[in-house]
Amino acid sequence: MSTRMTVNYNKKPCYDIVFTDSFDALASEVENLQLGNRKICVVTDSNVDPLYGEEMVNCLKGVSSKCVKYVFPAGEDNKTLDNIKELYKFLIEEHFDRKDILVALGGGVVGDMTGYAAATYLRGIDFIQIPTTLLAQVDSSVGGKTGVDFDGYKNMIGAFKMPRLVYMNMSTLKTLPDRQYFSGFAEVMKYGLIRDEFFYTWLIDNLYEICEKDPAVLEEMIARSCDIKRVIVEKDPTEKGERALLNFGHTIGHAIEKFMNFELYHGECVALGCVCAAFISWKKDLLTKDEYYEIRDMFVPFNLPISIDKLDMEKVLELTKSDKKMDAGQIRFILLKKIGKAVIDDTVSDSEILDALCEINFDEENGI
Ligand code: NAD
Ligand code: GLY
């Protein structure tokens, strides 16, 4: 059983997202793209390779002239230009030309890096996303943002590059460690908070099924998340305006990610960033106090952090100001007017950021 969704770019169909529960239909999906009998390089990481690498190469052998595999060391700290350089070398040694294809098999790190290599190798070659984490399925594989970190600064180098296909085998989530699964859930919660209060309520109503990874609920959650993202990226593919709403929680989240040297996962930092942004929204009278506490506390049953130990607040403020979400020297924040409605705000001051960081800084007295 599979369903699909088409994502438009410049008002024309650009790529399909296939939602399914095995790799059985992958070869025929790739064949349907009529890419010709080209070489394929499956790019994956050292955790995903032993799980799905061989199956992937076997699937794609029949629809390519040659299928090779390139494996990065896993982890955000490997999302670097140095590793992209190693991939370029491998592609040159394997004589990859402009019509050959990269396949990103893995989470957001593999997807972002493979997409960036595809955007830049020989000025651009085709690539396919095969996301295997919840985060990559609901967010990073859709919309064409690709890139790498630079000196620990998140996604500082990058390009927009649309995939030719996004093939989601949702059964790969069965091997994903729980902590990674819930980290991905932070981006799902983000969609409800910025865009769709009915989806937010649906998430709360299905809390048990989501935590238990019920397949039918998972499929609906992933497809609804992709649909929310699809609508936004179709209107604003290169983040001239509305797409920035997807950065809710990321402004401070990225700074915490760097501050913690990637010991906390991306989604965990996004959850903390969402709490900060909701707090600032309350302090600016956009949200009520009750709404703020409801948002903050809803991350807890999904195993996401709402506070952090020993935060160096001045340092995180400084890192927040070095993130790329700046506009003419002013940090661009995404705030909430209510659950389901986000706005861009350029007026958040240093002291408002410090107050928000103080709110998430672990306090032994009140236990959060
Ligand atoms: P990740 O790619 O590091 O994957 C998390 C971990 O899970 C890794 O150790 C990986 O090896 C392992 N893994 C992957 N699939 C697995 C599976 N099925 N079973 C077992 N283990 C598996 O991290 P992520 O959370 O998927 O992605 C985070 C990255 O995505 C960040 O770099 C973030 O900046 C980026 N991101 C990009 C966008 C975008 O629009 N391009 C959006 C959101 C996040
Ligand atoms: N994850 C943010 C974006 O795709 O724009």
Image: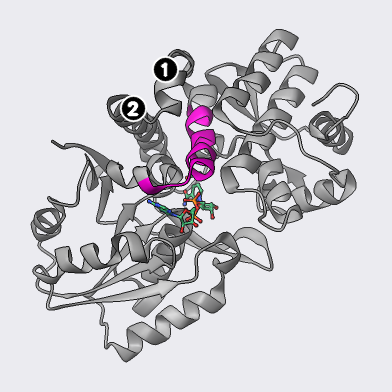
The residue labelled by disc 2 is 214
Q: Is residue 334 left or right of 311 when viewed as pictured? A: left
Where does the magenta region start and end?
175-191
Q: Give the quadrant of the C terminus.
A: top right
Q: Is mark 2 within 8 Å of ligand 1?
A: no
Q: Is residue 202 left or right of 302 when viewed as pictured? A: left
Residue at the (77%, 32%) spot, across then down: 347
The structure's colour scheme is one colour
The secondary structure making up most of the magenta span is helix
Checking the image for residue 206, the label placed there is 1
Q: Quadrant of residue 248?
A: top right
* Label 2 crowd bin: few (<14), some (14–19), many (20+), radius 10 Å: few
Q: Is residue 281 left or right of 367 when viewed as pictured? A: left
Residue 9 seen: no
**Amino acid type shown at disc 2:** Asp
**Secondary structure beneath label 2:** loop
Q: Quadrant of residue 322?
A: bottom right
Where does residue 155 sit, x and y in percent of width and height? 58, 58
Which of label 2 and label 1 is nearer to you?
Answer: 2
Where does residue 163 sit, x and y in percent of width and height? 30, 56
Q: Is mark 1 within 8 Å of ligand 1?
A: no
Magenta stretch encompasses residue 331: no
